[in-house]
Amino acid sequence: MKAIVLTLMCLVLGLVVNAQDFNSSIQTARQSYSSGNLEDSRFAMQQMLQEIDILTGKEVLKILPNTLGALEAKIAEDQVNAGVGFAGAVIHRLYQTDDKSAVMEIISNSPLIGSINAILSIPFIGTGANGERRVVKIDGYKALIQKSSDSAKIAYDIQVPLGSTLITVRTENYSDDILKLANNIPVALIAQKLN
C-alpha cells in the first residue's frame, strides 16, 4: 500500500512540474468531448497518458543500478520515449566497459509478453534442447536467458516479463557469470514503479 501511495505521489509531483501541459491536455479533452469531437478528445487523452509514461520512465531510470556486473552505466545516454501505437513507454540504459556491453530496455505494454510467458510456462520449451536457453528466477520473477555465440563473440538475452511490461537485457562480448549480472537487475523495484 505504501508503494502505491509513494508511486502516486511521485507521479503527482512529476505532473506538477509538467502541470501546464497536462492541464492543457485535460482542458482540450474536456472541450473536445463537450463539443462532440471525440477524435480530438481521444488524442488529448493519449497525450496525457504519454506524459505519464515518460514521467514514470524517468522514475524507473533513477532506481536502475549504476553498474551491472562489471559494466558501468552510460547515464548520459539514458532515454525514455513514449511508445508508438499499442506499445507503452520504452526505457533505455546502456552499460559498457571496454568491449563488453549490455543494453537494458524496459517496454510497457510490450507485444512480446504473450510469447515470453508461453515459453516460461512450458518447461520443455523453456529449457531448450541444446542448453542455450534456460529459465531462472531473478528477484523472485521468472526470466528467460538465451545464449547465442558465433566464433568470436558470446551474447546473452535476458527477458523478464512483469505483467504487461518486458525487461530485456542484451549483452555483447560478456562471458562472465550471466546469473550474477542478472541478479543485479532490481526487478521487484521496477515492478513496483510500473505495475
Image (cartoon, helix red, strand yellow):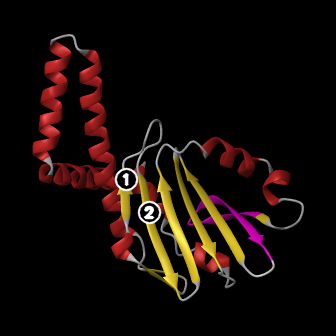
**What residue is disc 2 on?**
92
- Secondary structure at badge 1 equals strand
Q: Residue at x 37, y 62 (%)?
A: 79
Residue at figure coordinates x 53%, y 75% from the top left: 184
Q: Residue furthest top?
A: 36
Q: Residues within 10 Å of mark 1 (few under 14, many from 20)?
A: some
Please provide the residue range marked out in magenta.
134-150
Identified by mark 1, the residue type is Asn
- Residue located farthest toward the right when viewing the structure as drawn: 129
Image x and y of residue 113, in percent: 60, 45
Residue 136 vs residue 129, the one in the foreground: 129
Query: Does residue 1 show up?
Result: no
Q: Residue at x 47, y 36 (%)?
A: 86
Quarter holding residue 126: bottom right
Q: Which mark is residue 81?
A: 1
Comes first in the chain, label 2 or label 1: 1
Up the image or down, 100 lies above or below 108; here it is: below
Question: Quick check: can you spot residue 32?
Answer: yes
Image height check: is 112 above or below 99? above
* Left or right of 127 in this view: 34: left
Do callouts 2 and 1 mark residues in contact (Cβ within 8 Å)? Answer: yes
Vertical arrangement, residue 71 with respect to residue 34, above or below: below
For label 2, the crowd category at 10 Å Cα-Cα, with few meaning under 14, some 14 to 19 and many 20 or more, is many
Q: Label 2 sits on what residue type?
A: His
How far from the left and from the top, in percent, is residue 148? 76, 69
Q: Residue at x 59, y 72 (%)?
A: 182
Disc 2 from disc 1: Cα separation: 9 Å
In depth, the one of 8 and 83 nearer the eye is 83
Chief SS of the magenta region = strand
Query: Residue 97, how many percent across, how many down?
Result: 52, 87
**Picture quadrant of residue 37:** top left
Q: Secondary structure at mark 2?
A: strand
